[in-house]
Amino acid sequence: MVVPPLMIPRGGALDPAGEGWIGRFGGGALDTCGLDNIGPARDGRGLHGSHHLTPAEDVAITRTPEGDVEVSGVVDSSRVFGRRVTLRRRIRIALGRPEVLVEDVIVNEGPAPADVAVLNHVNFGVPVVVPGTTVSLAALGRTPRDAAAEAVPWEVFPYPVDHTTESVWEHTGLAVDGQGRARAVVRTPAAVSEATLGAPLEAAVSWRAEDLPRCVQWIYPTRGGWALGIEPTNAPLFGTDRSGPHAGAPVLEPGETRTAGVTLTLG
């Protein structure tokens, strides 16, 4: 049954409980998780929260004087007797440049403080991701989620396997450039990309480290799945940091605003 957007109550009412997010994950270049939770289900909030299933409102498409295309909209993270948080998103697709800019402004419009977790799940597959594709991300700390993650080096994408598995790493203490931006670069091996595409292939994800001070890396080498996620975030997915208040997510006071977003560049 297809439910028209106007029939869906605000606040992510279709958010699946527990680990149900996995069954609703449709891939795509960007999947934003939050704003009420990222990571494992907790305190009645499902895996990766309700944002991905909450319809956007006030969606508009415009063209800038430079010829770029902009898409904007608003997504709520609200409950009748609870939080009132909104995310205002602007996506800008550059004309003549292989670049997509995603800018978010998050506002606590409610009368009480609200925790706000954001994880921008940027996904890559073929032809960028092949066996031997490398990831470059300057950081002081790198933590595998578990022994399975530790067995898969984060710097090089492995060969495909015939069983379902994943490896998850968290990068902290991110290095930044003169504008305070962190950067992860995904590169296809030169021999592979030159043979198939005629030139080396590279993709970069950049973001303001002040907004999203952590980066989770998801490696999914299962044959038929085959994906790499670069996931800038403002809260932990695992570890002792997650055991604190609000699972380590920042808290916005009433009326407070926070920004987030990522830029994807292909080269």
Image (cartoon, rainbow, N blue to C red):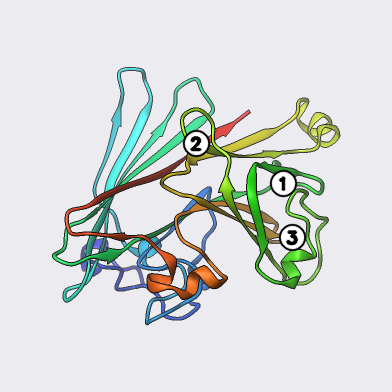
**Quadrant showing the C terminus:** top right
Q: Which element carries disc 3, helix, strand or loop?
A: loop
| Whole-percent x, y for residue 76 in the image | 25, 59
**Label 3 or label 2, whichever comes before in sequence order:** 2
Mark 3, Cα crowd under 10 Å, few <14 / some 14-19 / many 20+, is many
Q: Which element carries disc 2, helix, strand or loop?
A: strand
- Quarter of the image for residue 113 reads bottom left
**Quadrant showing the N terminus:** bottom left
Residue 4's place in the image compared with 180, above or below, is: below
The amino acid sitting under disc 3 is Pro
The amino acid sitting under disc 2 is Arg
Residue at the spot 51% in from the left edge and 23% down from the top edge: 97
Mark 1, Cα crowd under 10 Å, few <14 / some 14-19 / many 20+, is many
| Whole-percent x, y for residue 34 in the image | 40, 62
| Whole-percent x, y for residue 143 in the image | 66, 61
**Label 3 or label 1, whichever comes before in sequence order:** 1
Residue at the spot 80% in from the left edge and 65% down from the top edge: 151
Q: Mark 1 — residue?
A: 129
Q: Mark 2 — residue?
A: 181
Residue at the spot 22% in from the left edge and 52% down from the top edge: 256
The answer to whether residue 242 is left or right of residue 62 is: right
Q: Which element carries disc 1, helix, strand or loop?
A: loop
- The label on residue 164 is none
- Quarter of the image for residue 210 reads top left
- CA separation in Å, label 3 and label 1: 10 Å
Residue 43 seen in this snapshot: yes
Residue 166's place in the image compared with 256, above or below, is: below
Q: Mark 3 — residue?
A: 221
Please say if the residues under marks 3 and 2 sit with CB atoms less than 8 Å apart. Answer: no
